[in-house]
Structure formats: structure tokens, C-alpha cells
Amino acid sequence: MKCPICQKPVKLDDPEMPFCSERCREIDLGNWAMEKYVISTPIESSDDDLGVDKGEE
Ligand SMILES: [Zn+2]
């Protein structure tokens, strides 16, 4: 089995499976969190534009 982050071979009995190390597992978690963040950001910012910006000026 290969690490999905760095493509290094991972042993089947590795405690960090399917990642080769804790570091790669954290990178994968980070990627996942970033994707969620990117999706939610445009919705939030367009909300701000319509509400706060025009309301205050
Ligand atoms: Zn790795």
C-alpha cells in the first residue's frame, strides 16, 4: 500500500496506515479542511458584501 500524500510504500501493520507517518496524515487532514474552507468562503464573503458594506455607508 502507498501513502496517498508522498507515495512512499506503507507497511500494512503501520499504525499510521494508510499514511507513512503522522506528518502525512496531518497533511491529508489539512487538505481536507482546506477544501471545506474554500467552499464555505465565497458564501460568507458575498453575504458580507451585501449586508455589512452597503448598510454602513
Ligand atoms: Zn507519506
Image (cartoon, helix red, strand yellow):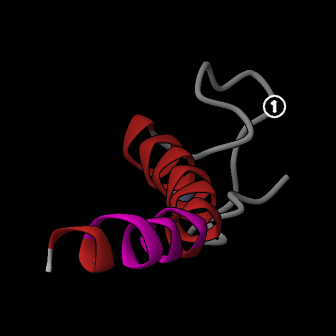
Residue 40 sits above or below residue 29 on the image: below
| Residue plotted at (38% across, 67% down) | 48
| Residue plotted at (71% across, 62% down) | 4
Which residues lie in the magenta part?
43-52
Report which quarter residue 52 is drawn in. bottom left
Viewer-closest of 32 and 38: 38
**Amino acid tagged 1:** Leu
Q: Quadrant of the C terminus?
A: bottom left
Residue 41 within the segment the image draws in magenta: no
Q: Position of residue 19 (x, y in %)?
A: 63, 44
Residue 7 sits above or below residue 19 on the image: below
Residue 18 sits above or below residue 15 on the image: below
Residue highlighted by disc 1:
12
Query: For numbered disc 1, what is the local secondary structure?
Result: loop
| Residue plotted at (51% across, 77% down) | 46
Viewer-closest of 39 and 17: 39
- Residue 32 left/right relative to 51: right
Residue 49 within the segment the image draws in magenta: yes
Number of on-image labels = 1
Which secondary structure class fits the magenta region best?
Answer: helix
Viewer-closest of 28 and 46: 46
- Residue 56 left/right relative to 34: left
Q: Position of residue 3 (x, y in %)?
A: 68, 57
